[in-house]
């Protein structure tokens, strides 16, 4: 049962539970995706049905910050805690590194994903970076093909919301990855 905050359904999980579920999705067959909406995106979803469908279609919907957690409490249906996307990603990468799984980084300006890849490989020894691509492409086809050929288990999709959620809903399965995570501006942060 998800907790509804103005039309977006959030999973009521702690960070530890979120990471556990994320890893279950990585190990299961088929393609899954994670969304981490903040209050601005909840607002966007009220106006944009495609965004709402894409966000609610995620296998895991995590409250990115305290705003959504406060909103849920005010509505009388509290969420356990905030589970920011960038922190979720950090924990997930630790687990991926331990299991020798591979990660593809998609998004941000040219050069940023490569720089993030170098930093992340250093910060998470054992993490395999399957490939990278910037977020300013015109056609989806070559990007999907690049991910597919890389054989990545997981893709961080950092195109900003709700573009990334729509992209994951439309193209996720074609990439062949087990899990895609929409993570906004995280690659800029990882690249330092
Ligand atoms: N971005 C992208 N392609 C686009 C538009 C944006 O790759 O067509 C990237 C942008 O370079 C930045 C990220 O998406 O790295 C969006 O970051 P922002 O913090 O604005 O998004 P939010 O985290 O609020 O969703």
Image: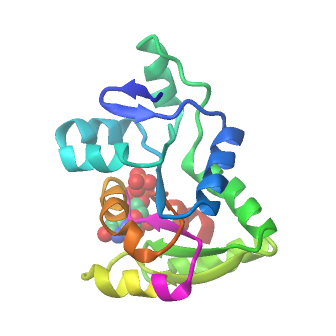
Foreground residue among 20 and 88: 20
Up the image or down, 183 lies above or below 84; here it is below
Ligand 1's image quarter is: bottom left
Residue 192 visible, this angle: no
Q: Is residue 74 magenta?
A: no
Instruction: Name, please, the residue furthest toward the front.
Output: 29
Residue 135, image x and y in percent? 38, 75
Foreground residue among 138 and 17: 17
Residue 27, image x and y in percent? 64, 62
Location of the C terminus by quadrant is bottom right
Residue 131 visible, this angle: yes
In this rendering, position of residue 148 left or right of residue 49: right
**Residue at position x 47%, y 63% in the image:** 31
Residue 67, image x and y in percent? 47, 29
Magenta-tinted stretch: 148-160
**Residue at position x 61%, y 61% in the image:** 26
Foreground residue among 9 and 164: 9
Q: Is residue 156 magenta?
A: yes
**Residue at position x 68%, y 39% in the image:** 17
In this rendering, position of residue 177 left or right of residue 163: right
Up the image or down, 69 lies above or below 103; here it is above
Residue 142, image x and y in percent? 34, 88
């Amino acid at each position: 049962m998800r907790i509804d905050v103005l039309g977006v359904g959030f999973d009521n999980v702690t960070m530890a539970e979120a990471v556990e579920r994320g890893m279950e999705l990585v190990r299961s067959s088929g393609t899954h995706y994670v969304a981490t909406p903040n209050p601005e995106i909840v607002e966007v979803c009220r106006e944009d049905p495609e965004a709402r469908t894409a966000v609610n279609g995620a296998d895991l919907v995590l409250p990115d910050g305290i705003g959504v957690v406060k909103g849920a409490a005010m509505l009388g249906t509290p969420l356990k805690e905030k589970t920011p996307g960038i922190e979720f990603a950090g924990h997930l990468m630790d687990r991926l590194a331990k299991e020798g799984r591979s990660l593809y980084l998609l998004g941000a300006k040219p050069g940023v994903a490569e720089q993030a890849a170098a930093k992340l490989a250093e910060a998470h020894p054992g993490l395999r970076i399957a490939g990278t691509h910037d977020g300013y492409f015109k056609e989806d086809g070559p990007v999907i093909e690049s991910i597919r050929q890389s054989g990545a288990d997981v893709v961080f999709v950092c195109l900003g919301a709700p573009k990334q959620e729509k992209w994951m809903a439309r193209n996720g399965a074609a990439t062949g990855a087990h899990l895609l995570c929409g993570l906004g501006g995280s690659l800029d942060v990882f690249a330092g």
